[in-house]
Amino acid sequence: RLFVKEQYDIVHTHSSKAGIIGRLAATSAGVPVVVHTIHGQAFHPYESWWRNRIYIAAERFAARRCDRIFAVAAAMVSQCVDSNVDGYEKYRTIYSGMELEPFANTVPDPELARRLGLRPGSIVVGKIARLFELKGYDFLLQAAPKIIAAAPDMQFLIVGDGDLRPALEAEVGRLGMTEHFVFAGLVAPAEIPQYTALMDLLVHLSLREGLPRSVVQAQAAGKPVVGFDLDGTPEIIQDGKTGFLCPAENVDAVADGVVRLLKDADLRQRLGAAGQERARQWDWRAMVDAIETEYTQLLAAKQSSPTP
C-alpha cells in the first residue's frame, strides 16, 4: 500500500528477508525500478542442505522480481550464479562504502589502553566480531598457544560481545592464557577507530562474511590483516602485500602468519601502508557514485521502453 500511495520511482531493498518481501511488494505495486543489495548469503556451506534449498528457491523467486542485484563482493555474485539464482547480467559488484577518515586519522590512546588492561610495549593482535558461531573464535583459540609461545609479550584484543563470551573466557582461562586476552565487550561503532588504533594487526577468521568491514577498516588504519581465503576477504587482502590469506580453517597457517608479523615490525609497517593505500577504494563516495549511476541508467531504460 505504501508503494502504491507514494508512487516511488525506485525501491532498493537490503538483506534476505526484507529483500524477498520488499521486491515482491514493489513489483506488485508497479514500481518502475526495483533493485536489491546482497550483503551476505542466507545459503552457505555451513547451513543444512534443506535450508539451503529453501533459501536458494526464495532468492531465485525474488531475483525474477527486480531489475538489478548489487553485491558487496564479487564472490557473492559467483555464489548466486553457481546456485542458479540468476545470470551474471542481473548482477553488479558495488563494494560497501565506509567513512575511512576516522580510521586513518585516529592515533593510539594510552589511557584507553591502560583502562583495557593492555600492557605498555605489548604487541596487540585484534579481532573485531560478534562472539557467535562461524565468527572463527574457535580457530583463534586453537592458534593462540603457538602465537603466544613465539611472542610471549603479545596480547589479543577482542572487540565484540555475544553468547559465546562466557565459554570463550572460560576456555582462555583453562588454557592459561588469561593475561594474553582482553575482552573489550560491545563497542559503539563511532568508537571502533579508537580500538583499531591500539592494534598492531588484525585477524579475521569468520567462515561466512560478505565483505568484512573490519578488514577494510583495519587496512584504512594502516594495520596488516591475516584472514581466511573465502567470500569477500580475498578481494580486500592482497596476500603478501597487505596481509596474509590462509586456507579456511587452517589454524597453523593463521598462527604462522600472525607470528611472522609479530616478529617483524618493518613487515607490519610495509604491509600496513600498502593496505591503507588499497583501502581508499572502499570510500563511501565511490559507492554512492556507483549506485547513483545504476539508478540513473535503469530508470532511463524503463522510461524509454514502450509501456506493455
Image (tube, rainbow, N blue to C red):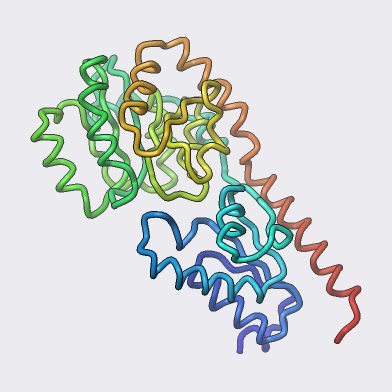
- Horizontal relation, residue 254 to residue 141: left or right: right
- Which picture quadrant has residue 115? top left
Name which residue lies at 45% across and 63% down.
42
- Horizontal relation, residue 102 to residue 226: left or right: right
Name which residue lies at 26% across and 52% down.
162
- Horizontal relation, residue 66 to residue 243: left or right: right
Image coordinates of residue 102 in percent, x first then y, are 52, 36
Image coordinates of residue 188 in percent, x first then y, are 38, 48
Image coordinates of residue 228 in percent, x first then y, are 43, 37
Q: Is residue 114 above or below residue 207?
A: above
Q: Is residue 24 above or below residue 283?
A: below
- Which picture quadrant has residue 2? bottom right
Total numbered circles: 0
- Which picture quadrant has residue 259? top left
Name which residue lies at 81% across and 69% down.
299
Name which residue lies at 55% across and 70% down.
59
- Horizontal relation, residue 150 to residue 24: left or right: left
Image coordinates of residue 64 in percent, x first then y, are 66, 74
Q: Quadrant of the C terminus?
A: bottom right
Q: Is residue 6 above or below residue 97?
A: below
- Observer-nearest of 59 and 283: 59
- Observer-nearest of 305 and 52: 52
Q: Quadrant of the N terminus?
A: bottom right
- Observer-nearest of 189 and 44: 44
